[in-house]
Image (tube, grey):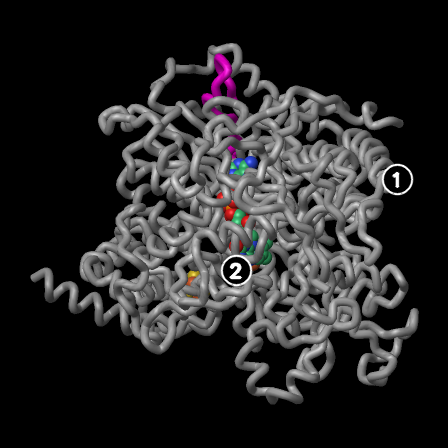
Amino acid sequence: MSLKLRIWRQADAADKGSMVTYQLQNVSPDMSFLEMLDVLNERLTLDGEDPVAFDHDCREGICGMCSLVINGIPHGPEKATTTCQLHMRHFSDGQTIDIEPWRAAAFPVVKDLVVDRRAFDKIIQAGGYISAPTGSAPDAHATPVPKADADLAFEAATCIGCGACVAACPNGSGMLFTAAKITHLGLMPQGQPERNTRVIDMINAHDEAGFGGCTNTGECTSVCPKGIPLETISRLNKDYRQALRAAS
Amino acid sequence: MTMTDYYTLGDPVADTKAPDGPIETRWERRRFGAKLVNPANKRKLTVLVVGTGLAGGSAAATLGELGYQVKSYCYQDSPRRAHSIAAQGGINAAKNYRNDGDSVHRLFYDTVKGGDFRSRESNVHRLAQISTQIIDQCVAQGVPFAREYGGLLDTRSFGGAQVSRTFYARGQTGQQLLLGAYQALERQIAAGTVTMHDRHEMLELIIVDGRARGIVVRDLVTGEISTEFADAVVLASGGYGNVFFLSTNAKGCNVTASWRAHRKGALFANPCYTQIHPTCIPVSGDHQSKLTLMSESLRNDGRVWVPKAKGDDRVPADIPEDERDYYLERIYPAFGNLVPRDIASRAAKNVCDEGRGVGPGGLGVYLDFAAAIGRLGRDAVEAKYGNLFEMYERITGEDPYSTPMRIYPAVHYTMGGLWVDYDLQSTIPGLFVIGEANFSDHGANRLGASALMQGLADGYFVLPNTIGDYLAAGPFPKLDGENAEVAEARKLVEDRIEKLLSINGDRTVDSIHRELGRIMWEYCGMERTDAGLRKAISEIRELKAEFWQRAKVPGDGEGLNQSLERAGRVADFFELAELMCIDALHREESCGGHFRAESQTEEGEAERDDERFSYVAAWEFGGDLPVLHKEELTFDYVHPSQRSYK
Ligand SMILES: Cc1cc2nc3c(=O)[nH]c(=O)nc-3n(C[C@H](O)[C@H](O)[C@H](O)COP(=O)(O)OP(=O)(O)OC[C@H]3O[C@@H](n4cnc5c(N)ncnc54)[C@H](O)[C@@H]3O)c2cc1C
Ligand code: SF4
Ligand code: FES
């Protein structure tokens, strides 16, 4: 099939940037979206133009590195699918496709489609862990964990830290990401001692890193490739209130 | 050409750090014998850790906890994205929670045997001992392992083991373990003991007065080259499967960090030992950029077959039962579809070579669930494999409930790596190597669920104990950019970047890498022959020359330039590829993942030659003429035997 691609080009963080149009022929429906961009980049390289910079690594939906807004939707039109798992058979011959980077105050553009997501690491640094220095652990069976809790914690822990939730949010909020970690650790018995400080510190870090507040629009969960549900944010809010009460 | 045209023979090497005496107490005795660093001195010692996967992430966090000054590096935008994140199946540990006869000794035994008697007993035994602590550590960090209704940890049996010792977190064990290590690392970053340098690539090792004292890195965003100094350097930079271009590795996985160290004197051990995984989704066209693994667990219920007749291109539903060849069940009646990875892979290659492969290019075999669906019902099959079926459909657009999956082997893991002693120190003092980047524990073949175990054993428990013995002699003299050896390392990097950017040829780096991958896959893949390897070496040399004349690397070194990053990695893959083929050529036996067609039994099974090849091949860099150093292997606890799965 042949496609008309409109791609965001921006030389570096300081550049203003603009959409640039490219025609691409002979796209196979079996290609992944990123393989389609590989083909474009091969051509640009041979034509002496600067290839399009985009982030990716595992190309199997787990590292969280790929990050494209495709026709206005973070990770594109397929539900529960990262950009790297999206295949061209979901597009049609002659279609125009807009490709843009994540746009959020906390994620500045580095170049073209590449953004800086280190603000997420800052949130984890503030408390997204259980303090368990190496060597200090009791036997793994010392504390049984109810299966239901372990399963729920696992669901929340599958967040890949891609940032689509932030890109989709009209406020640029990182609340779904933060809530996923709060939920994961808060459900495990090992996570209890730090539960109150964790939620307060992580939310403070979230706000300081330039993310917006959450107004429950739910856009985040609808684009989340791992289907992290909105209830995780309710859990976070509950934990937050409880922590504030405990602190006062 | 005779063998001596390919390499020369050097002095033997020995692992001088492993204590002898009873194997059960060797690790304890080594720890007791190792010098300690006094706590006040740790603050004055700097350690660089390259890589943030299971090995590097766990090591950096633990060294930070101990009080060292740690600097951590990765090429991705966050340490959480290292390729360990993609591991699916699980992690082994000799907990014996099932009371099914497992023990440290059994895990040790299985690993030595699984490695086809090409690994060191001392190392493997230590790995098995530490395995139990890893699970404790990860649970304490809140890793959400699968649990049973009683709240205790669930396990499964994996990769042909007869006991149930694999701990898992659905199909995302690597992700959950890595996030545990990542979170411990971020905690240390917040505490100020570790500084993180993401989007930084190590391009050279700095050696001063014979010791590894630092690295040269490029900031991938600004293009800035800087020199970083330390008292010791740890490489945890992962495996090199991407030398084949197509593999299950992430696109950025590379050999550069290891190779640069190798060029500076670190021996590279057993480079040809490659694991090829039998159940991956086949290539769909020339655009293919990577291959996706389908969990091996599928072989528990799927039946592997191809048409009996050559070139039969009917759709699978139109091929009647008696015209199908369930070849694994036919050749290996005892193990059937569950034969080990290398055997299943080679069998698939053989039927495809006979012209009976299915799908595009005839490079695929069917993995059919019709019988399982008939026997267990669709719902039961969905409950077990639903997410895998979905993943398959997403990639291929075919529904595996109604038509058989197509699978084909793909490069998955590299057992070879930089040579290390029992302390995980390379032949360069002060350079330690952990995780998939070293060669240490898996011999010629790695068992399923053992890489995660090894990465975490190295990072959490082994290295933090052994590195102190070396660092006790530090801090070493202060360095700066004026030092001749430092300036030289930096210049090497700058010159190479300039050289890559100035070729300005007419071929893209990817197109050349793809061609290199084809040569490697054809001649140094599932089956290797003397003639094929010789041919490969000369083709690689020609292509390497072509790369340096015709590659086109656009842009400059001044900012984010992904083409330049790739070009540097491919340049190193060329040199590695040559060494892999030379190693494969010299090893005139079959063992584990290394199958030499000339060395097989009458039934076509791999035949080891312990008389001649019971050693680790540790290669010294020598350009076109590497030098082979042999480390003899001795087996005092597990007696070498020939594998049989008939
Ligand atoms: C698809 C897949 C599934 C697997 N499933 C399993 C399983 O179920 N069980 C199991 O035991 N094993 C499994 N394995 C194998 C296992 O995942 C790996 O061997 C292991 O995770 C490697 O860990 P590592 O820490 O050594 O390296 P990696 O996790 O690959 O980390 C390498 C690190 O080095 C950094 N790096 C590399 N080069 C440079 C450089 N030049 N400069 C700076 N940084 C650099 C990277 O940024 C990264 O942080 C699987 C592997 C794959 C590919
Ligand atoms: S919550 Fe979902 S969208 Fe947000 S970072 Fe995690 S996986 Fe990505
Ligand atoms: S590239 Fe890893 S999730 Fe898309």
Point 34% across, 53% down: residue? B137
| Type of secondary structure dominating the magenta stretch | strand
Tag 1: residue type?
Answer: Ala
Q: Give the magenta-colored segment's residue range.
A: B206-222
Can you tell which quarter of the image residue A221 is in? bottom left
The residue tagged 2 is A62
Instruction: Say whether residue B88 is left or right of residue B627.
Output: left
Residue A169: tell me if it is visible: no
Q: Nearer the viewer, residue B638 or A240?
A: B638
Report how many numbered discs are placed on residues in the image. Answer: 2
Q: Nearer the viewer, residue B235 or B137?
A: B137
Residue B348's place in the image compared with A105, above or below, is below
Magenta span has B210?
A: yes
Q: Quadrant of the N terminus of chain B?
A: top right
**Is ligand 3 within 8 Å of the beta carbon of the residue shown at mark 2?**
yes
Tag 2: residue type?
Answer: Ile
Can you tell which quarter of the image residue B34 is in? top left
Point 40% across, 23% down: residue? B231
* Circle number at residue B531: 1
Point 43% across, 63% down: residue? A159
Residue B390's place in the image compared with B344, above or below, is below
